Image (cartoon, rainbow, N blue to C red):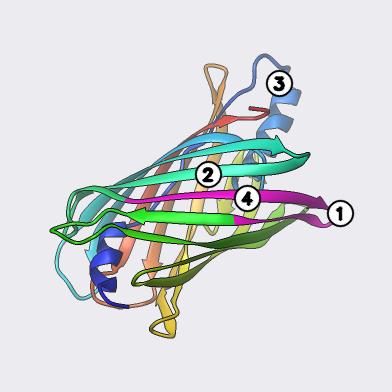
């Protein structure tokens, strides 16, 4: 795809923050709520209102010298319309430093219709992305379908989330593996926010990060928050893509919001 390398550098890596007001509760009830919140934060189809902040440090790239830092703000708003559960998510990325032009990067919005099933949940809906142009380049707009399914068994949460974007000079699909293990007391290990990206124009995967995320949901002054750290390594060695990165996240969770 024309211009893919520069776009990959500009997009950087994302992370997330979620927050919740729990009110007053006995310690046992608070522990139960914390475990349920920890499970929901690992599930992109969960109806959990959240405000997410992430900062990603990229110490090295494939094929080029330098390091970078990116920031992300993400809001997740669940709602019901025509008696159907919806999840509206807006994500704004910002390049702080590095080889990519500084400033606003891609902005992505999707709305997922969610359906409960005995085995878990599945959802589908539209996703759209705007990538602002730089140095005289035109803005890039892409749109397509998104879908996902997630199930939980015991301490495990697992599934897959898929987004597809098509437009001028854009034809990509991304897969996000959903895999998390709840260790208790709000602690969890997960696959994190890795996005495996397939470029239809080039007929191959162009981004294959793997990593592990350590997170904890806790109450701070009566407010439920989640913090996380997520190191990743990109198995694809295309020039301009991050090689290593570490994502730090802080989330405000608002159950029932």
Q: Earlier in the sequence, mark 2 or mark 4?
A: 2
The magenta region covers 106-125
Q: Quadrant of residue 47?
A: top right
Q: Earlier in the sequence, mark 3 or mark 4?
A: 3
Are the residues flagged by discs 2 and 4 in contact, CB closer than 8 Å? yes
Looking at the image, residue 107 lies above or below residue 170: above
Measure how far apart labels 3 and 4 are at the Cα level: 34 Å
Looking at the image, residue 222 lies above or below residue 1: above
Residue indicated by mark 2: 89
Query: Which is closer to the viewer, label 1 or label 2?
Result: 2
The answer to whether residue 166 is visible is yes
Crowding at label 3, few (<14), some or many (≥20) Cα neighbours within 10 Å? few
Residue indicated by mark 1: 118
Q: Earlier in the sequence, mark 1 or mark 2?
A: 2
Looking at the image, residue 67 lies above or below residue 197: above
- At horizontal 42% and vertical 42% (from top left) the residue drawn is 249
Crowding at label 1, few (<14), some or many (≥20) Cα neighbours within 10 Å? few
Residue indicated by mark 3: 27
Are the residues flagged by discs 1 and 2 in contact, CB closer than 8 Å? no
Measure how far apart labels 1 and 3 are at the Cα level: 30 Å
Marking on residue 112? 4
Question: Element at badge 3?
Answer: helix
Are the residues flagged by discs 1 and 3 in contact, CB closer than 8 Å? no
Question: Element at badge 1?
Answer: loop
Q: Position of residue 5 (x, y in %)?
A: 26, 72
Are the residues flagged by discs 4 and 1 in contact, CB closer than 8 Å? no
Observer-nearest of 166 and 11? 166
Image-based side of 207 in relation to 61, left or right: right
> Which residue is situated farthest in the top direction here?
24
Query: Which is closer to the viewer, label 3 or label 2?
Result: 2
- At horizontal 57% and vertical 56% (from top left) the residue drawn is 126
């Amino acid at each position: 795809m024309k211009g893919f390398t520069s776009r990959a550098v500009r997009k950087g890596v994302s992370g997330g923050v979620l927050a919740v007001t729990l009110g007053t509760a006995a310690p046992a009830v608070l522990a139960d709520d914390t475990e349920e919140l920890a499970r929901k934060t690992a599930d992109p189809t969960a109806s959990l209102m959240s405000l997410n902040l992430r900062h990603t440090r990229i110490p090295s790239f494939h094929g080029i010298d330098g390091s970078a830092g990116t920031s992300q703000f993400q809001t997740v708003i669940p709602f019901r319309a025509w008696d159907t559960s919806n999840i509206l998510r807006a994500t704004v990325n910002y390049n702080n430093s590095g080889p990519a032009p500084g400033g606003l990067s891609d902005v992505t919005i999707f709305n997922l219709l969610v359906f409960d099933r005995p085995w878990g949940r599945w959802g589908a809906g539209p996703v759209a992305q705007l990538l602002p142009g730089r140095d005289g380049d035109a803005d890039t707009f892409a749109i397509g379908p998104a879908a996902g399914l997630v199930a939980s068994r015991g301490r495990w949460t697992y599934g897959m989330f898929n987004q597809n974007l098509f437009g001028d000079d854009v034809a990509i699909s991304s897969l996000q593996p959903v895999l998390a293990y709840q260790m208790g007391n709000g602690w969890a290990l997960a696959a994190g926010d890795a996005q495996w990206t397939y470029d239809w124009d080039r007929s191959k995967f162009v981004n294959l990060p793997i990593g592990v995320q350590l997170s904890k949901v806790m109450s701070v002054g009566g407010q439920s928050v989640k913090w996380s750290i997520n190191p990743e390594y990109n198995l694809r060695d295309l020039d301009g893509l991050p090689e290593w990165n570490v994502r730090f996240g802080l989330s405000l969770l608002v159950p029932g919001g």
